[in-house]
Amino acid sequence: MLAAIFLNGSHPSVKIVKKLLKEHCHIVAADGGANYLHSKKIIPDVIIGDMDSLSNQASEYFRKKDVKTIKIKEQETTDFEKSLNYCRSAGFNEVNVLGATSNRPDHTMNNFSVMKRFRNYFDVKIFTDEYEIFYAAKKVGFKYRKNETLSMMAMPKAVGVSTKGLKYKLNEETLEFGIREGSLNESVSQKITISYKSGTLLIFRKHFIN
């Protein structure tokens, strides 16, 4: 079961958005994320949040479309976390997130933190115009284009990191936030393998959706 969560940040191109909204995809608007959907005439299945960012115009438009609205007033969780809790309770096993990055670095970092809390419940990925961002399992392998950028960021530490198919190889090494990053590596093969023994590792890879 696939869900797509729209947050109130910078969204990929409409072409990428439409390719991510596969058949039977359940569309969740996190509060102000509904404003973007309204501008593109995309109808969500549900709007969730404290509704402090939802415009009156979008609210009225979706009310007429009979879109379900779940207002959650408590401020202990962000609208992103409220949406992920909804997806977890609804039994989704794959969640694509759009609008999670922006010119507000605090919001972007907070979204990476929230995503980390849910990484064991389902496959959750953030999409930008160029990148697919996700927390890696202890071992992950995937096809990739040669001579393309791939970055790794420990959140906050990943021990025993080894790679295959990257220009700057890692062999049982430690990455740690504020100590050592794995950013701006480059693929030298069409097959990439990344593994690590413990900790948490955030991957930034290009998605090639066009």
Image: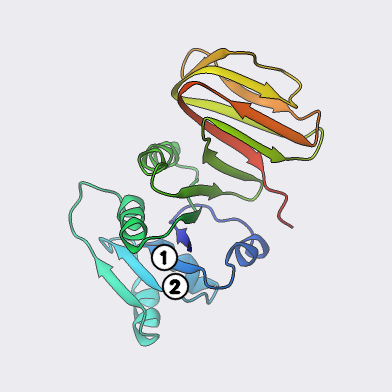
Is 59 left, or right, of 204 in this rendering?
left
Residue at mark 1:
28
Mark 2 neighbour class, 10 Å CA radius: few under 14, some 14 to 19, many 20 or more: many
Q: How is the image coloured?
A: rainbow
Residue, x 36% and y 52% (percent of image)?
Answer: 80
Q: Amino acid at mark 1?
A: Val
Is any atom of residue 120 visible in this view?
yes
CB contact under 8 Å: marks 2 and 1: yes
Q: Amino acid at mark 2?
A: Pro
Mark 2–mark 1 distance (CA, rounded to whole Å):
6 Å
Residue, x 28% and y 61% (percent of image)?
Answer: 52
Q: Earlier in the sequence, mark 2 or mark 1?
A: 1
Is 192 left, or right, of 98 in this rendering?
right
Quarter of the rendering containing residue 92: bottom left
Height in image: 72 above or below 162? Answer: below
Q: Residue 1, position in %: x, y?
A: 48, 63
Is any atom of residue 98 visible in this view?
no
Q: Residue 137, position in %: x, y?
A: 51, 35
Height in image: 146 above or below 27? Answer: above
Mark 2 element type: loop
Residue 6's label in the rendered image is: none
The quadrant of the picture occupied by the C terminus is bottom right
Residue at mark 2:
44
Q: Residue 72, position in %: x, y?
A: 22, 61
Q: Nearer the viewer, residue 199 or 62?
A: 199
